[in-house]
Amino acid sequence: MYRELFHDPQNASEKIYVAGERYPDLRVGMRRLSLTNGESVDLYDTTGVYTERGYEADTERGIPRLRERWIEERAAALPEGEFHTQRWYARHGVVTREMEYAAIRENAGLRPGDEGYVTPEQVRRSIAEGRAILPANRRHPETEPMVIGAEYLVKINANIGNSALGSSVAEEVEKALWAIKWGADTVMDLSTGANIHQTREAILRNVPVPIGTVPLYQALEKVGGVVEDLTWEAYRDTLIEQCEQGVDYFTIHAGLLRAYVPMAQRRVTGIVSRGGSIMAKWMAHHGRESFLYEHFDEICEIMARYDVALSLGDGLRPGSIADANDEAQFGELKTLGELCRRAWKQDVQVIIEGPGHVPMNRIRENMDRQLEWCDGAPFYTLGPLVSDIGAGYDHITSAIGGAMIGWFGTAMLCYVTTKEHLALPNRDDVREGVVTYKLAAHAADVAKGHPAALARDLAMSRARYDFRWLDQFNLSLDPERARRMHREMVKENADFCAMCGPHFCAMRITKSIK
């Protein structure tokens, strides 16, 4: 059913597999681009089994359970009912199969001894120190391990999910698969409409990247959408339900305290986070701190049993330039740092969420304060959006900020689509958003001097100078669009720049100089 999503007969790439050294049975999938000059470029690949030669997708069966045996072997070595997180193993000096797998993925095209080569020990150490996470719920054996941290490739997340206004289970699975085709490293299911459980189940069983959710949304649905009727018990049951299904990381808005709500009410745009607004209304009604804050240690205990990573949500992220870096946002950020340290005590892996709408001149402050107040935990940001007037183009508005904050040290960017602030994104919007954010993440990696990112740019530059059009298409982030745009004007194998024409092509003229 989904074969056509990944089918591109003109793309000169093939799936290759790299074996582990500590665990030789590991087979880590990469994408190798064969160039027309005889060279090749290896790329990080998020498509999983869908691009294996001859693989037949079956959504009822789901994809292979890559990690099932690894999980069973670890469980067999422990007393019955006991389970340890990746952070626990990392702190105790154990390099797991997941850690080596993630290290190999980071080394697209790099060899031992190369500058920037990532070792399994490096991954272990960064997880142990809280500078990286490896989101991999033991109930989600289908996921291919990956690492999120400032010292690794900048990752991107794609949000999908239905709403009360529409979208089916099949449509959401298709959007998730469409997202990973274009390079989404994780996917968040933010469904708030019908069939939330069934939608999430289908995504988990068919998508090979880590899946995140905001459990509060389903908990609210269970009480008929009435915020005041939310209870800790309803939320706890939802949390366990999603842990059991296999969700790899949760956004939890536990850092929004009662004291911060009046600060937010003085803003131009108030509280723009769905989770944040829900908890603010709940606290105002009940006259006490949120059950997320009051029961935070219990939340961590539940998550540790499944090794679900904690994404500490920024319920008070600014929704406008005027509200950026205000007392409400930074007050919550300090609290997130406190909660991060509490979660670490239970060996829960933690990532910190960040803004939001922030002008370019104030982006660096966000990164610096997050590193200081959250003890170097990975930062995960929505953009930031550097202007408020980009309606219809907010994928660009936010990618500008995303590239900047990724350069400064953010580990993962949450994509924004063209329809941000306007409507629910469709499949085309997902593609546009993912590719735009892959560009922002890549630009950040180039600025940080990541060898694999620089190598891909160099290969593209050489292909451009040699007028190797097919190589240019395939080295781009969206080969299909690049190929289509070029062939609208220029015949194949033209030895001149498509923009300038045969007589004014600077590169062609340069080559003629003796």
Image: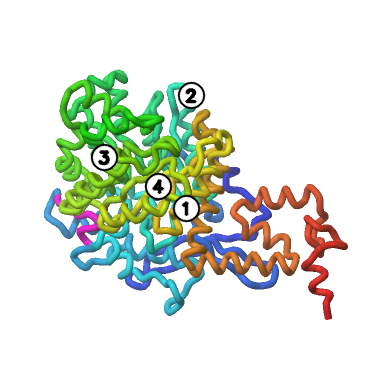
Whole-percent x and y of residue 445? 48, 61
- Frontmost of labels 1 and 4 is 4
**Image point (25%, 35%), residue name:** 260
306 lies above or below 426: below
Whichever of labels 1 and 4 marks the residue nearer the N terminus, that label is 1
- Frontmost of labels 1 and 2 is 2
Query: Which residue type does callout 3 highlight?
Result: Glu
Determine which residue is flagged by label 2.
166
Whichever of labels 2 and 4 marks the residue nearer the N terminus, that label is 2
**Image point (30%, 44%), residue name:** 330
Q: Does the magenta stretch include residue 85?
A: yes
* Label 3: how many Cα within 10 Å (few below 14, some 14–19, many 20+): some
Secondary structure at badge 1 equals: helix
Q: Is residue 269 left or right of residue 456?
A: left
- Frontmost of labels 3 and 2 is 2
**Image point (21%, 34%), residue name:** 259
Determine which residue is flagged by label 1.
48
Gap between marks 3 and 4, in whole Å?
Answer: 27 Å
Whole-percent x and y of residue 227? 27, 22
Proximity of marks 3 and 2: CB atoms separated by less than 8 Å: no
Query: Which residue type does callout 1 highlight?
Result: Gly
Q: Residue 381 carries which label?
A: 4
Residue with the most extreme right position: 503
Q: Does the magenta stretch include residue 246?
A: no
Whole-percent x and y of residue 372? 28, 56
Determine which residue is flagged by label 3.
244
